[in-house]
Image (spheres, grey):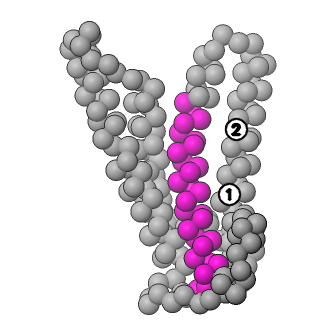
Amino acid sequence: MNLRDLLNIILKVAFIFLFVQSFTTFFMDLYSVLFMDVDIIKKIVSLSTITIFLLLAYYVLIYETDNIIKFLKINETVLTKEITFKDLDKTTLLQTLLIFVGVFMLVYNLPNFLYQTINYIKQILDSEAFMFNPYLWKLTGLSIFISLCIIKFSNPLTKILINKDESKNTPQQPL
């Protein structure tokens, strides 16, 4: 495996993390647009514009990492240097990094989710005593769900990302 492959994998994982964080944030905004007192045409245009923009941006960020590396104009001699990891190939490295991102997102969002859940219970018991933020509670809950999905489905996600990469490049080689 050369430095270009490693940088490619790191960028994919970083952009997946960015995608999930942005998706959860924009999902809540899209959800609120549905309940705005606006004409249905404006709702549809808003929802489709935001969704199409997100999908196009993240397609480029996740599947076109080679073009991003070219855009960064890193010296080609640096990118072709071989990196060796004993008994570790691209697939294993990518799957490990996906699991790491899923665990990181889980650890990052779980305390806030639990805090909001406790505040919700306290608010039920004493409506004046505690602040409960339903927006933040839903946002962190959605992030936790997505992080658990990334952990659970890291193998199929890895195959999808590697197959997309393989269709553009040479066959997979051990690191």
The part of the chain drawn in magenta is 1-28
Disc number placed over residue 12 in the picture, else none: none
Q: Residue, x 71% and y 49% (percent of image)? A: 57
What amino acid does circle 2 point to? Thr
Say if 39 sits above or below 21 in the image. above
What amino acid does circle 1 point to? Leu
Q: Assess disc 2: are there few (<14), some (14-19) or many (≥20) residues with their C-alpha within 10 Å of its C-alpha.
A: some
Q: Is residue 23 magenta?
A: yes
Secondary structure predominantly adopted by residues drawn in magenta: helix
Residue 68 horizontal side relative to residue 99, left or right: right
Front residue of 5/73: it is 73
Q: Which residue is mark 2?
A: 51
Find numbered disc 2 in the image and state the secondary structure of the residue it sits on. Answer: helix
Residue 98 horizontal side relative to residue 37, left or right: left
Q: Which residue is mark 1?
A: 61
Picture coordinates of residue 137 (x, y %)?
39, 30
Picture coordinates of residue 153 (x, y %)?
48, 59
Q: Residue, x 54% and y 87% (percent of image)? A: 83
The C terminus - image quarter = bottom right
Q: Is residue 19 magenta?
A: yes
